[in-house]
């Protein structure tokens, strides 16, 4: 990956670059249909610098692990060696239920660009390495009842405190949820999560169906934080509400189109006005969790990457040869008018080798002044770098 952060006001242009190699040894062992063991380890040599672009290629650490290795195995001058024990689980099938214990991938919801229902560490916008979702330490029990009803229970563990964190942080901050999936044939699928996460009452939902040849979906999540003050509509509100609606259409000529809109009450509601050098959007505060009494905002626990309140997204893609495709996606902050434009081309070079080429283009007002040596944003998505990338994958 390579790119620039353009000059803006008194802030000079900076060049950024990153090379990430990923070696992922995996093992799967099974005993008939009853037992299955899964193992995967990521080894990641990284050359270059730039925290923002690194998070596009390497998923950030997640708190939802009981214990973990230090992600940095070696920290050198311009070279890091990172690693991640990403899967270590055992699945047992008995009495019609699947019981999975250990480090595993868990997901919820179906949004493509603006996820708001996934409480288990979703991918951020612009993420390039999305083939493997980061594993969590959990106990998961899944029990289907026929074709149209499924019950599931999750106990996702949370690590203990580290330097500067509350002493009582630990298992009580995990996710303890029940899920019910109901299918109504030819009408819709409805999935609901309910329970406790980060000690707060939590609800999640994901509904999807078909209308006029397109797939529709509505998803979201809500938490009630009784320690916060305020009301719905600000980052300090008691109700933390996030929701997404979208339409996805696969056309007969191999063209695919998608549109989504999302709302999150915990986001900044800045409207793009300048404020004499201060942060006019509260974006820094939302990112750092400076609002309200709550220390469990979605931006802090890895569930949210966007910092505004209202966003819109769209994507168009088309297969132009067998297994080759071109796409153009975009995400916009509706209030401040900033956006991210993401063109890309994917090529299948063989059964085992694929190549992706793309870019992330930031649009909107850029930072123009520094506060205590740090740039101050004037828009959310306009503050990012301009990045191009090449992604080569080989599996055997």
Image (cartoon, grey):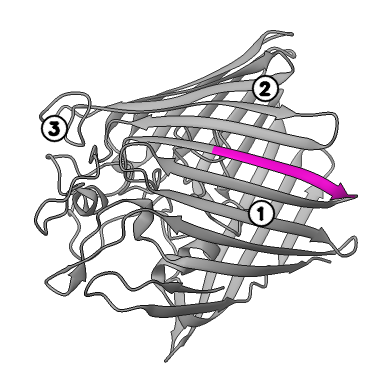
**Residue at 44 percent of width and 28 percent of height:** 177
Q: How crowded is the residue under tag 2: few (<14 C-alpha within 10 Å), some, or many (20+)?
A: some
Magenta-drawn stretch contains 319:
yes
Q: Is residue 334 above or below residue 103?
A: above
User: Comparing marks 2 and 1, which lies closer to the viewer?
Assistant: 2
Identify the secondary structure beneath mark 3: loop
The earlier-in-sequence mark between 3 and 2 is 2
Label 1, label 3: how many angstroms apart (C-alpha)? 37 Å
Q: Is residue 230 above or below residue 125?
A: above
**Rendering coords of residue 93 (x, y %):** 71, 33
Identify the secondary structure beneath mark 2: strand
Count of numbered labels shown in the rendering: 3
Residue with the mark numbered 1: 131
Front one among 35 and 143: 143
Residue with the mark numbered 2: 215
Q: Quadrant of the N terminus?
A: bottom right
Q: Quadrant of the C terminus?
A: bottom right
Q: Is residue 85 above or below residue 323?
A: below
User: Comparing marks 3 and 2, which lies closer to the viewer?
Assistant: 2
The earlier-in-sequence mark between 1 and 3 is 1
The earlier-in-sequence mark between 2 and 1 is 1
Question: Mark 2 and mark 3 in contact (Cβ < 8 Å)?
Answer: no
- Looking at the rendered structure, which numbered label has been put on residue 167? none
Q: How crowded is the residue under tag 1: few (<14 C-alpha within 10 Å), some, or many (20+)?
A: few
What residue range appears in magenta? 314-321
Question: Mark 3 and mark 1 in contact (Cβ < 8 Å)?
Answer: no
Residue with the mark numbered 3: 228
């Amino acid at each position: 990956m390579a790119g620039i952060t353009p000059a803006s006001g008194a802030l000079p242009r900076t060049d950024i670059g990153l090379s990430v190699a990923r070696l992922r040894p995996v093992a799967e062992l099974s005993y008939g249909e009853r037992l299955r063991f899964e193992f995967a380890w990521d080894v990641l040599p990284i050359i270059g610098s730039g925290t923002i672009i690194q998070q596009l290629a390497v998923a950030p650490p997640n708190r939802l692990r009981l214990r973990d290795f230090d992600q940095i195995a070696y920290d050198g001058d311009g070279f890091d060696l990172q690693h991640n024990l990403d899967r270590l689980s055992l699945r047992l099938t008995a009495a019609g239920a699947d019981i999975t214990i250990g480090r595993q991938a868990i997901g919820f919801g179906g949004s493509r660009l603006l996820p708001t229902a996934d409480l288990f560490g979703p991918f951020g916008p612009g993420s390039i390495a999305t083939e493997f979702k980061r594993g969590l330490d959990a106990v998961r029990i899944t029990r289907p009842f026929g074709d149209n009803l499924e019950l599931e229970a999750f106990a996702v563990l949370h690590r203990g405190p580290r330097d500067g964190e509350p002493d009582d942080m630990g298992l009580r901050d995990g996710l303890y949820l029940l899920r019910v999936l109901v299918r109504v044939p030819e009408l819709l699928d409805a999935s609901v999560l309910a329970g406790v996460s980060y000690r707060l009452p939590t609800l999640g939902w994901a509904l999807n169906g078909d209308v006029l040849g397109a797939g529709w979906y509505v998803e979201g999540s809500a938490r009630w934080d009784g320690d916060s003050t305020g009301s719905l509509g600000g980052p300090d509100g008691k109700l933390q509400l996030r929701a997404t609606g979208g339409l996805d259409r696969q056309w007969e000529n191999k063209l695919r189109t998608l549109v989504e809109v999302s709302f999150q009450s915990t986001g900044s509601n800045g409207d793009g006005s300048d404020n004499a050098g201060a942060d006019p959007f509260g974006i820094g505060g939302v990112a750092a969790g400076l609002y309200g009494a709550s220390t469990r905002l979605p931006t802090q626990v890895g569930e949210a990457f966007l910092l505004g309140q209202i966003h819109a997204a769209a994507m168009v893609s088309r297969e132009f040869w067998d297994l080759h495709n071109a796409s153009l996606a975009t995400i916009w902050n509706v209030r401040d008018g900033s956006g991210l434009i993401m063109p890309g081309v994917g090529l299948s070079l063989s059964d085992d080798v694929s190549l992706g080429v793309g870019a992330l283009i930031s649009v909107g007002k850029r930072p123009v002044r520094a506060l205590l040596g740090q740039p101050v944003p004037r828009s959310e998505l306009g503050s990012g770098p301009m990045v191009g990338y090449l992604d080569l994958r080989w599996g055997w």
